[in-house]
Amino acid sequence: MTIEKTLAELVAINSISSNSNVEMISYLKARVEAAGFQTREFPYTDERGVQKANLIALAGGVVSERSEAELALVGHTDTVPFHAAWADALHLTEREGKLFGRGSCDTKGFIAAALTAVESVDLKNLTRPLALVFTADEEVGCLGAKRLLEARALHVSNAIVGEPTSLQPMRAGKGYCLAEIIVRGREGHSAYPSVGASAIFRAARLVTSIEKIAERLKSEDVRADFDPPYTTLNVGLIQGGTAKNIIAGECRLTFEWRPVPGQRAQHVLDLVNEAVAEQRALEADFECEVKAARLDEASETPAEATLVRLLEEQTGRAAGTVAFGTEAPQMISLGAHAVVLGPGNIRVAHRTDEFVPIADLHQCAEILRHAIEHFCMRD
């Protein structure tokens, strides 16, 4: 099957994160088993009661409670939603050397390349185990990969994690962290401010302190190989109050931060808690709760790692870094040197008319084939 046909079949499966990915996993399981892989599914039910599954496929080794692989090709099966007006979102269309469709870039293009690569080699010649890892719920927090990590389902020495990088190998990535702050006050009639305490005013003072933390981070743990070269922080949502003439009794802030490698994910949370303590010292009844929802550490693979050097040689491009979240941290925790790489550009992902260049697809399949031969087909 051509790589274009494979991608068309993958895109036709509506695997947005709110849906079950079981159809996608069933398709992939059939394809890889036909190619000669053994498989193991890891089903689970998400918090909304929707059935999900991860899939590990192994060739050249034995599937067990803790399989081992010299190389793993890792792709997430879910996509972000698409606008109803995009009529061809699930129908791959070609224009000017590009293939358009939801997931074509992020990251079904990589999966199509991985399937093409493994079907182009004779698995009987493997001397070390090769794994394909297909995950659920990456777009909503890398939840599938975290479940595989929790289960210690695989030990892997090298991992290529599929994401649209325009085929530039990315050896390091920032972490991703999320927290909610609940600031409480006392409701009262707005004509008599002394009878209440505005949670919105209190939250505004805290936001000012958080902005100062964001400025401070610009000069802490600077990493010139990242853009921007420091940990970023953003207050993305604010909700508070019940009516224009009621002193607000509660205000909620949602904020995120993306730590650089070498900086603990907890560091920013500690700074915010210090700012809360400072506000309490100034206002005795200042009431605030900080709830961390996600603390994903940054990831980094050494520049001298064999996988990094091999992919630099194959692509003709120096390894770089990414600021967006990937499943590389989970693969590193499973023992791997992990590099993020894939066809397409992240800047066209998550939008209407997402696309992947056809040339990227074919080149990616060749890169992955060469990696398989290097790590799994040599004594």
Image: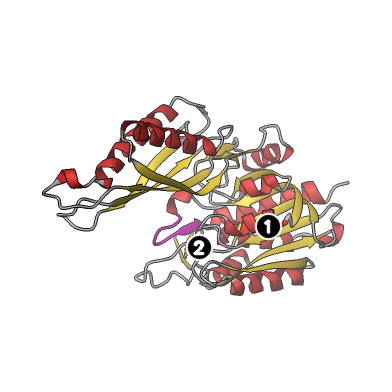
Which residue is farthest right?
Answer: 379
Q: Which residues are magenta?
A: 349-356
Could you say which is closer to the camera, residue 297 or residue 33?
Answer: 297
Q: Position of residue 1 (x, y in %)?
A: 66, 70
Left or right of residue 245, residue 216 in this image: right
Number of the label disc, if any, that sits on residue 366:
none
Count residues near mark 1 (Cα–Cα under 10 Å), then give few for <14, some for 14-19, many for 20+. many
Task: Assess whether residue 352 is covered by the magenta stretch.
Answer: yes
Could you say which is closer to the camera, residue 74 or residue 142?
Answer: 142
Number of the label disc, if any, that sits on residue 148:
1
Q: Position of residue 200 (x, y in %)?
A: 26, 46
Q: Residue at coordinates 44% horizontally, 37% vertically from top-left?
A: 273
Number of the label disc, if any, that sits on residue 79:
2
Q: How far is mark 2 from mark 1, CA to CA?
A: 19 Å
Q: Is residue 269 above or below residue 80?
A: above
Secondary structure under the numbered disc 2 in the rendered image: loop
In primary-sequence order, the first of circles 2 and 1 is 2
Q: Residue at coordinates 19% horizontally, 47% vertically from top-left?
A: 195
Which residue is farthest top?
Answer: 219
Report which quarter residue 65 is drawn in.
Answer: bottom right
Could you say which is closer to the camera, residue 205 or residue 79?
Answer: 205
Amino acid at circle 1: Leu
Q: Does any portion of residue 277 appear in the rendered image?
A: yes
Q: Look at discs 2 and 1 and give the one toward the viewer.
A: 1
Q: Is residue 214 above or below residue 161?
A: above
Q: Does any portion of residue 97 appear in the rendered image?
A: no
Left or right of residue 253, residue 49 in this image: right
Q: Position of residue 33 (x, y in %)?
A: 75, 70
Secondary structure under the numbered disc 1 in the rendered image: helix
Amino acid at circle 2: Thr
Q: Is residue 232 above or below residue 200?
A: above
